[in-house]
Image (cartoon, rainbow, N blue to C red):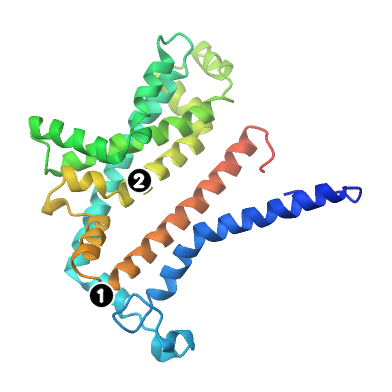
Amino acid sequence: MAALPPYASTGQKVWHYSYLAICAAIFFFLIAPILIIIPLSFNAENFFTFTPEMLALDPEGYSTKHYRDFFTNPDWQVPLWNSLKIAPVATFLSVALGTLAAIGLSQPHVPFRRAIMAILISPMIVPLIISAAGMYFFYSRIGLQGTYWGVVLAHAALGIPFVIITVTATLVGFDRSLTRAAANLGAGPVRTFFKVQMPLILPGVVSGGLFAFITSFDEVVVVLFVGSAGQKTLPWQMFTGLREQISPTILAAATVLISISVVLLVTLEVLRRRSERLRGMSPG
């Protein structure tokens, strides 16, 4: 945020600092629960609370035993590997289908573009419980309920809207004369796409893919409906652990997920700045 000019009035200064205080309060309200989870995951005791030793910063009050349990206990490792098997495939399908949909809907001659776009991004708007119930009844009829591919397709459906939105935003500044020039030089549609169009929209494609991956890796409601015990994911295991047994290992798992999300969000910001540089904009 830009600094106040020296000639700012008293009212402008009051509004400026009030605005900063409100933003700081909102940021603290959003980030405080996450910051509390991280130190709690190093609790030496099997409690969801800060012990006197932890508050006194006594090394005896801290331990990595919950992380050791997370990385060695089959009850956690199996769901983790299930998530790692489901999320990449769902992300690939989301990126492939979402990118093609965004490119197609960016063409001015496509009829009913707005209606089609609204339908494709509806999984972002419709409550997850409704989507999950609909997927359950539909997949039950076609034999996909409780299968690996059923969960993958469900997560892909949830990730496609993110890819469509990010790729569509990238296509806004795309110079279509480049594709026409490639066609005039003899390049076919496929070659033009991979050699000309894809390098320029790649930041949007990767950003959408990262959002789709996060959505799949963190999703729990849909997998409860369309999955089975064989497709139990990490969020499902965390949800079950909260219901059946309050184990601090859940906090270690949550910290791992937070770390993954932070890395992906930093990657998104780097890609955003790169995209703006490619489009001749100054990162802001």
Q: For the residue labelled by badge 1, is the local secondary structure a helix, a strand or a loop? A: helix
User: Does residue 4 appear in this view?
Assistant: no
Q: Residue 232 versus residue 171: which sits nearer the camera?
A: 232
Badge number at residue 69: 1
* 70 to the left or right of 122: left
Mark closest to the chain's N terminus, 1 or 2: 1
User: Does residue 248 appear in this view?
Assistant: yes
Residue found 19% across the figure and 37% down from its top: 133
> In what quadrant of the picture does the C terminus appear?
top right
Q: Position of residue 135 (x, y in %)?
A: 19, 34
Tag 2 residue: 215
Residue found 45% across the figure and 40% down from its top: 206
Q: Is residue 116 above or below residue 56?
A: above
Q: What amino acid does circle 1 point to?
A: Asp
Q: Position of residue 195 (x, y in %)?
A: 48, 27
> For residue 79, which quarter of the picture?
bottom left
Q: Position of residue 5 (x, y in %)?
A: 86, 48
Q: How many marks?
A: 2
Residue found 32% across the figure and 74% down from its top: 67
Q: Is residue 118 above or below residue 156?
A: above
